[in-house]
Amino acid sequence: MTATVSAPEAVSGVQSLWRRQIHHYPENRTRVWYLAIVVAATIVLYYELYIGGAVSPSIIAGDHMTFPFYVYLTVAGNAVGAFGSLAAGLGDRWGRANMVAYGLVITGLLVLIGIPNISGKWAFAILYAIVGMVEGVILVATPALVRDYSPQLGRASAMGFWTLGPVIGSLVVAVVSSNTVNHLHAWQDQFLICGVVGVVVGVVALFGLKELSPQLRDQLMVSHRDRALVEARARGLDIEDSLRRPWAQMLKLDVIGSAFAIAVFLLIYYTAVGFFTVFFTTLHGFSLSKANSIGDWFWGFDAGALIIVGIISDRLRVRKPFMVIGAIGAIVMTIIFLNLGAGTSYSTFALVISINAVFLAIAYAPWMASFTETVEARNPALVATGLAVWGWIIRAVIAISVAIMPLVITSMTPLVTYGTQAQTIQAQYPQQVQTLGVIDAKTAATLHTGKSGTTAYNTAVGVAVKEISGAFKISSGDAVNRLLAASKVPAADQTFLAEHGQDVLNASNAAPNQWKTWWWVCVGGEVLFLPFILLMTGRWSPRKAREDADAHQLAVERELSALDQA
């Protein structure tokens, strides 16, 4: 029997840039090439999306944003991306490859030419939202392509490589920025580097990416041995019938619940993407490059674990036990992480978040495979629609959680806006800043602006000497000497400390408990993930899973035999 679909007219030349369907299941080498393009596209897209987080303190200060404005900018980007994900559900009818190829070219040009050359926070916000919208589309289209090219028995490995997209994207951000931010001081330079990479990969996808015809991709394929049967069935498959009422078929508890569960489970991941640099620079005093290099450990261990866990999950043919182990481990490590206080070393942070990253990967790669299998159990022709539901929910959850974040961590605006300058002044004049810090605001204002020798000024000096003497338990003479030393601090620095010093101090005192509260919210999301595992398709026992695969293979052979006889 010939295992091919009746071939339509050949497509060549310019038409091949938008007519991308292939009408036979590709050989393994070609299939791996298409999957490699999809993974590269995903990595680059998330590199483009996350690069802002690596230089967020510089963007906030350079474009005169407040921390809440930057946060709500992220909210808007995720909200727009959520509706981009819904639009990508049309990939079941129109295909996925063009969405990926042209989306990459658009975002690459925006990051290379648009964002580095604009000024002002609103212009940045608009372009960021456009990138977020395209990311929402590709978030759905790329895993749909991975599903199309990977039978179920290799799905976790393939999805492990796909999930490298956001993880390696984050790792590239951390590695590139930590090694260049001290040499290329302008935050725009990071976007220029990213944009060049984006355009190159976009061109590769434009010329090299193909997709299966609807007749092929709309079937369930358990192993590569199903290839002949899938192609034989494709000759008579009624595509339109399987695409009727797509949303009604996918808006089911197992699909919606699973998507919501992974969205809240990954709250800590998305916090790491957007705010690790803010957390480590403002709360623990690391430099921007050092904070990004902590991320190297997180993303590196996450990436390695995703691949290894995917291979093991496929070998054992089960997903759910991995999800449970990963979730419990992530809960334990997040609790350990949130209890690390001031003075925690770089190496301790790197160790704890690396172990946490491994547990997140243990849960996530098998979850992605299981979710696509859960969607296939409903209708294999509507994988992109099911992934659109997931994409919308995960973007909506991120948008809502990030919108809530400034209400929980109110200390971030003064720390991000003024904390760096305050730290610089304190490092340059440590004792003098301590001295100025114990003088009440009214007295400090009189000393700063009053005229020497006047009654008001002399009174202020007396009050300041008493305050310094009492605070440091020293004599009045020593207090006078400290006050004289403090007066040598430049006037501009004294003005800055008078206007913002107390706000920064109050925020510094409040920040640790506020961040701890937020990390507990992330723990809650990880706990909530566990019961929803029960809704998903798949076996708990490797033995039962092997029996299912053997039974499926027998059914395939019987159907092929019947088709041969017919």
Image (cartoon, rainbow, N blue to C red):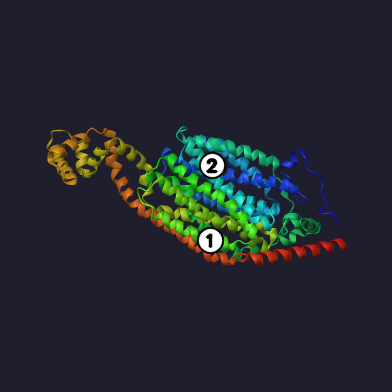
Which sits in the foreground, 323 or 169?
A: 323
Which sits in the foreground, 499 or 142?
A: 142
Residue 107 drawn at (x, y percent): 59, 41
103 left or right, relative to 472 = right
Q: Residue at x 84, y 64 (%)?
A: 562
Residue denoted by label 1: 325
Does residue 485 show up? yes
Q: Marks 1 and 2, how far apart in space?
A: 28 Å
Q: Mark 1 or mark 2: which comes first in sequence? A: 2
Determine whether 51 is above or below 268 in the image: above
In the drawing, what numbered circle is on residue 4? Answer: none
Which is in the foreground here, disc 1 or disc 2?
1
- Determine whether the residue tagged by mark 2 lies in a helix, strand or loop: helix
Determine whether 529 is above or below 51 in the image: below
Q: Residue at x 55, y 54 (%)?
A: 361
Q: Which amino acid type corresponds to the residue marked 2 in the rendered image?
A: Val
Q: Residues within 10 Å of mark 2 (few under 14, many from 20)?
A: many
Q: Quadrant of the N terminus?
A: bottom right
Does residue 566 show up? no
Q: Which amino acid type corresponds to the residue marked 1 in the rendered image?
A: Ile
Residue denoted by label 2: 172
Determine whether 7 is above or below 62 in the image: below
